[in-house]
Image (cartoon, grey):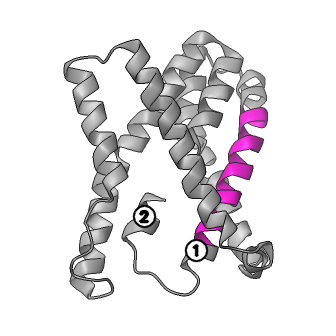
Amino acid sequence: MALAAVLPRNENSERNLVFTVISVTLLSTVAMVVYPMLMTLLGFDARAAGLFLGGTIHDVAQVVGAGYTMSEETGDVSTVVKLMRVSLLAPVVFLIALAARRSGATRQKAALLPGFVLAFLGFAMINSVAPMPEGLTRTIGDASGWLLLTAVSAVGMKTSLKQVQDVGGQAFALVICETLILAGFFLGGLWFLGTS
């Protein structure tokens, strides 16, 4: 969603966003069930399994679910790895927005970083310097979940499943291939580093 906020808009932008959200959620849910079994089958220790889960599953909630299904240590490692990936979105989104602005493909006055990315970075910095009270953290977390649900629901309400279907099987195959390549990359890296 962060990239969708800074990329040039066209008549298919919302349809493509809904397709992406549905595809990523579906594949993350499948991975949440299948990947822990794969980690057990391959004999990965808790740390290596956490690295794999956090590095390959697309959605934070499914990373947490998969990790803590295996063990507390795996859950902790997978959550930290996933949050590191999320924090790297800010520079990537910034660079893509900058490139779009320079190419003339987007409005000059569009923000280089969406407000929710700036809010994420701000809260992460504040919480790192002076941890927030647990009650406030829980309240902000709950509000964040509801706001994300509202945003995704709003996009979904404006898009029909027929429009999403029109994206086609090739796009879904591409998302599946990306997911498998990411899994293969992490498996290869873990074996290469001998952390399994």
Q: Residues within 10 Å of mark 2 (few under 14, many from 20)?
A: some
Q: Amino acid at mark 1?
A: Glu
Give x and y (percent) for residue 179: 64, 53
Residue visible at 72% across and 26% down?
42
SS of the residue at dot 1?
A: helix
Queried whether the magenta region covers residue 167, the answer comes back as: no
User: Residue at image x 39%, y 21%?
Assistant: 136
Q: Which residue is mark 2?
A: 3
Residue 191 seen by the camera: no
Q: Residue at x 75, y 31 (%)?
A: 38
Give the mark count. 2
Label 1 environment density (alpha carbons within 10 Å; few <14, some 14–19, many ≥20) = some
What range of the chain is rendered magenta? 16-35
Residue 29 shown in magenta? yes
Q: Can you tell which quarter of the image residue 168 is in? A: bottom right
How many angstroms separate mark 1 from mark 2 (CA)?
12 Å
Q: Is residue 158 left or right of residue 73?
A: right
Looking at the rendered structure, the kind of residue marked 2 is Leu
Judging by the rendered image, the residue that carries numbered circle 1 is 14
